[in-house]
């Protein structure tokens, strides 16, 4: 607890007044000194007896570089008091309107919000927080500090491969994975967007014109599964994991069960949305991705980083130079390029 600039001014005025009263007598200065002393002492007592406000932080949704998120917290105060709330924002995050500092009046539960932009891949932190309260006259201030922080995962930046490259990747993977669908059920007319792999060419050939039919299965779920491995030096980690995240996203949107082996971590193949977020979370925090040769041999797809660029290597010799293509392409980064909740599609088709 310490005086504000206004409080120091009052202290100086009182000191000068007391010095003058010692020299010329106190009677003429009582009207100035006494009220100032009363107000200053009252401010010290009121601020000193103030109960420490409690702070609760709200979760921050994970996202990709370029996404905007709202940092929200609730401050609970027993009494009405003027306060300045200041929050710290860690590296890898960018505040939208400058330093997050709010001057407000705390009363009961006060909700405070400000916006940040996700910038750099990794586990990022918001906080700690400080609250500075003052008495009603602004003479004395008291600072409370809170160690609690909130974390947010920033996923790897996604390469925009373009429709042709994404289709080429799906085709290359489709040639290497086994179709794990259940038994055939019936035929139906081809609809725009149906995978060409589902076209029943023999039945289509018997139909007049160019009409196509598609084979439906009893439980038409995952179209096979693959495991992706990563291989590269630590200094290429960001480029490497961006390429891996891009491949995972493209294949996930194609309803292929995707497994991930990177560093010492392994995620078994799945098409579940929670599994997709888990893979992105792993890629958000990984620093190194060197693998043993046996692990690379067991993988269906290897994403390799070297001096020439990041290359997706598909089993049976098919190679896609994703890194070199990405140099001339835009990079997916904002919420306009994909869904912000990472539950659905629309990323790189």
Image (cartoon, helix red, strand yellow):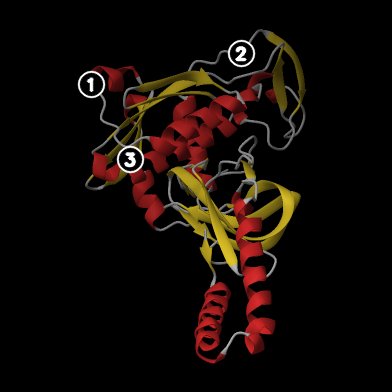
The answer to whether residue 215 is above or below residue 339 is: above
Name the residue nearer the viewer: 201 or 38: 38
The answer to whether residue 164 is above or below residue 173 is: below
The residue drawn where x is 70% and y is 58% is: 81
Q: Mark 1 points at which residue?
A: 293
Apparent side of residue 314 relative to residue 102 in the rendered image (left or right): left
The answer to whether residue 108 is above or below residue 224 is: below
Name the residue nearer the viewer: 294 or 50: 50
Apparent side of residue 249 relative to residue 214 in the rendered image (left or right): left
Say which of marks 1 and 3 sits in front: 1
Q: Residue furthest bottom?
A: 24
Q: How far apart are marks 1 and 2 (CA)?
A: 31 Å
Camera sees residue 53: yes
x, y percentage for residue 307? 22, 47
Q: Name the residue under label 2.
A: 181
Apparent side of residue 170 relative to residue 61 in the rendered image (left or right): left
Contact between marks 2 and 3 (CB within 8 A): the answer is no
How many other residues sit within 10 Å of disc 1, few (<14), some (14-19) or many (≥20)? few
Apparent side of residue 66 relative to residue 341 in the rendered image (left or right): left
The residue drawn where x is 40% and y is 20% is: 266
The residue drawn where x is 31% and y is 27% is: 263
Q: Name the residue under label 3.
A: 311
Please give the label number shown on residue 86: none
Name the residue nearer the viewer: 34 or 54: 34
Camera sees residue 96: no
Q: Residue furthest top?
A: 183
């Amino acid at each position: 607890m310490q005086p504000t600039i206004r409080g120091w001014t009052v202290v100086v005025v009182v000191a000068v007044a007391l010095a003058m009263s010692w020299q010329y007598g106190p009677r003429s200065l009582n009207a100035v000194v006494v009220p100032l002393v009363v107000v200053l002492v009252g401010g010290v007592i009121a601020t000193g007896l103030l109960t420490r406000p409690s702070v609760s932080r709200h979760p921050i949704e994970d996202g990709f570089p370029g996404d905007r998120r709202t940092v929200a917290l609730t401050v609970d105060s027993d009494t009405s008091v003027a306060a300045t709330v200041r929050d710290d924002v860690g590296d890898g995050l960018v505040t939208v309107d400058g330093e997050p500092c709010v001057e407000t009046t705390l009363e009961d539960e006060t909700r405070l919000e400000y916006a940040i932009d996700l910038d750099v891949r990794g586990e990022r932190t918001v906080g700690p927080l400080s609250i500075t309260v003052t008495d009603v006259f602004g003479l004395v201030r008291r600072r409370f500090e809170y160690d609690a922080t909130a974390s947010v995962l920033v996923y790897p930046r996604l390469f925009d491969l373009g429709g042709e490259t994404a289709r080429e990747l799906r085709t290359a993977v489709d040639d290497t994975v086994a179709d794990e669908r259940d038994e055939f059920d019936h035929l139906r007319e081809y609809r725009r967007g149906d995978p060409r792999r589902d076209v029943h060419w023999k039945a289509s050939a018997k139909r007049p014109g160019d009409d196509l039919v598609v084979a439906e299965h009893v439980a038409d779920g995952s179209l096979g599964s693959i495991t992706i491995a990563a291989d590269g030096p630590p200094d290429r980690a960001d480029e490497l994991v961006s390429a891996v995240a891009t491949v995972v996203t493209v294949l996930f949107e194609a309803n292929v069960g995707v497994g991930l082996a990177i560093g010492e971590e392994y995620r078994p193949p799945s098409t579940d949305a929670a599994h997709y977020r888990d893979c992105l979370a792993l890629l958000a925090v990984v620093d190194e991705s060197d693998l043993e040769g046996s692990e690379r041999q067991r993988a269906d797809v290897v994403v390799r980083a070297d001096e020439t660029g990041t290359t997706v290597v598909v089993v049976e010799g098919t190679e896609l130079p994703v890194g070199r293509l990405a140099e001339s392409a835009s990079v997916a980064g904002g919420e306009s390029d994909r869904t912000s909740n990472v539950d659905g599609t629309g990323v790189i088709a």
